[in-house]
Each structure stands twice: as C-alpha cells, then as structure tokens.
Amino acid sequence: MGDKFETGQILEGKVTGIQPYGAFVALDEETQGLVHISEITHGYVKDVHEHLTIGDEVKVKVLSADEENNKVSLSIRATEEPPKNNPTSQKKHEANQSDNTNSGFNTLKDKLEEWIKQSEK
C-alpha cells in the first residue's frame, strides 16, 4: 500500500460509506481511506450527508498513508479553492467601522490622544 499512495498525492475515489465522523472513499479495489468530517469542505460541516452520498465520485488528497495499519487519511477540502471573502459583506464591514469610530477597538495612539484631551479639561 505504501508504494501506491504518497502524502500529497491527488486521486479520484468513490464514496463507499458515511459515518457521523466522516466518509470512507475507495481508492482502488483493495484500499479505502477516510475523509474526516473536518476535511470534507471549507467551513463547518454539521452533517456529512448534506455534502456527500454513497457512490459519489470525489477528488481527494492523501494526507497520510500508514502502510503498517493499512490506513489512509484523505481530504476533499485540500483539493478545493478556499472561498473568497464576499465583497458585499466586506463593504458592509468597512461601512460599519467608519460609522462607529467611537465604539469597538481603537488603536493605543488614538486612545492616548483622547486621554490627553480629557486630562486637559
């Protein structure tokens, strides 16, 4: 098995089983690997069934291959582009920051200037 699968290798596999903690993927006739629930996709996964079904063809990356114990750890997430920040939410965030200049976190320099003004009064 160790000769066939190397860490970092990208492979095609087929989902053969789903458990609450992840999904089993057949890499060939003899070898199955586990995609842990945290490696299914970017972001939070509450239920594996919402993302995968038995029989799905998936692209996986080999995270580790343990020949002695015949275990292969896989990741679907590592084969996908991470989601980009939503520009709309970024604009809202920037707008909220400019509207609330007196609330939230201020830099020490800004607070120092504010404190000096207050102490002079």
Image (cartoon, grey):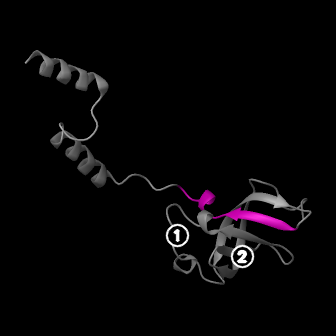
Q: Which residue is the site of mark 1? A: 45
Give the CA distance from mark 2 to mark 1: 16 Å
Q: Earlier in the sequence, mark 2 or mark 1?
A: 2
Q: Which residue is drawn at the image coordinates 30% and 25% (left, top)?
A: 108
Q: Nearer the viewer, residue 26 or 108?
A: 108
Vertically, is 97 above or below 71?
above
Residue 9: image quadrant is bottom right
- In this rendering, the answer to whether 40 lies above or below 92 is below
Asked whether 120 falls inside the magenta stretch, the response is no
- Disc 2 is placed on an element classified as strand
Judged from this view, the residue extending furthest toward the left is: 121
At mark 1, the secondary structure is loop
Mark 2 is on which residue type? Phe
Q: Residue drawn 52% across and 69% down?
A: 45
Q: Is 29 in front, or is 43?
A: 43
Please tell me which residue is depicted at 18% across the width and 37% down the height of the picture: 101
Amino acid on which the number 1 mark rests in the picture = Val
Q: Which mark is residue 77?
A: none
Q: Is 102 in front, or is 9?
A: 102
**Disc 2: which residue:** 24
Magenta includes 71? yes
Q: How packed is label 1: few (under 14 Cα within 10 Å), some, or many (20 or more)?
A: some
Q: Residue at x 51, y 73 (%)?
A: 46
On the rendered structure, is 78 left or right of 113?
Answer: right
Tell me residue 121's x, y (percent).
7, 18
Image coordinates of residue 85 in percent, x first then y, are 39, 52
Percent of width and height locating residue 61: 70, 60
Left or right of residue 31: residue 82:
left
**Magenta stretch?**
70-81
Q: Is residue 67 left or right of residue 17?
A: right
- The spot of residue 73 in percent (x, y) is 74, 63
Mark 2 or 1: the one toward you: 1
